[in-house]
Amino acid sequence: MNRVALITGATTGIGFELTKLLAADRYNLVLVARDEQRLRQIAADLQTRHNVSVTVLAKDLAVAKNGEDLVQELQETNVVVDTLVNNAGFGLAGAFVETDLKQELDMIQLNIVSLVTLTKLLGRQMAQRRQGKILNVASTAAFQPGPFMVVYYATKAFVLSFSEGLAEELASSGVTVTALCPGPTATQFSKRAQVQESILFKGALLPVLDAATVARIGYRGLLKGRRVVIPGLMNKLGVQGVRLLPRRLATSVTRRLNT
């Protein structure tokens, strides 16, 4: 059975760990990221280790239309995607009135617009075949507002809401949608977002999980068709705590964690 999985943000962190899990399960892969050289290195290694086919597509999904162009390329080469992993994303810390607008618009394009585009175009094909799996990487940030990372938190709230709503729409279609909501994770995310010195990523309050652990938990949830997956007991408790707190107090707590 020639199953195909497409993974965005496949070169580092959770996305990279998911590529290894999928390859080990004998999925042929379509790997998407900006760094073509790194993609080709990963592809060569996975092909050698697992004897799977790996297609490399070097695309920056923070650029408008690249998501649609990606799907068009797949159609032109007759690649049928059975499992979609929307992992690509980034954050940016700082006071909203001072942060760079271009970076935040790129973030919205990548974290939301490209994710919706790929889910729409590939999810439609899955629904027509009545078979498929979609994993959207959100965050525990999705469960409350995030002062000093307001755009990032808002994008992840969108991903969670979108994924849960779509999962219900597709409940009888043969297609499952899973939102993976990791807490602080040891990846390059914190450095790019400039939050590596925050309370959250220093591990002072919650344990910082490694990317391989998060990927394993997320992958199990994907295979089971779970709608929301929150890796780590403390992260689960933290999310439940936020739900019990008054909204303004939860936002105030998050402000302290992000500084």
Image (tube, rainbow, N blue to C red):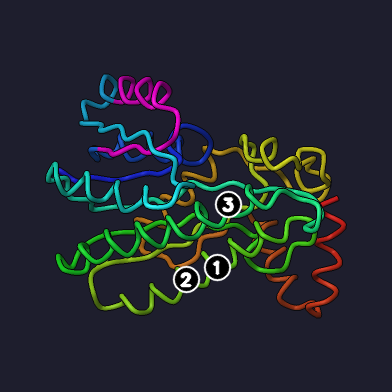
Disc 3 from disc 2: Cα separation: 17 Å
Disc 3 from disc 1: Cα separation: 13 Å
Between discs 3 and 1, the one toward the N terminus: 3
Left or right of 1, for residue 85? right
SS at badge 3: helix
Q: Check disc 1 and report the residue beneath it.
A: 158
The residues colored magenta run 29-46
Q: Check disc 3 and report the residue beneath it.
A: 107
Left or right of 12, for residue 48? left
Where's residue 255, x and y in %? 84, 60
SS at badge 1: helix
User: At x 44% / y 34%, what residue is drawn?
Assistant: 34
Q: Check disc 2 and report the residue beneath it.
A: 162
Per the picture, the main secondary structure of the magenta-coloured stretch is helix
User: At x 52% / y 55%, what residue is drawn?
Assistant: 111
Residue 8 image label: none
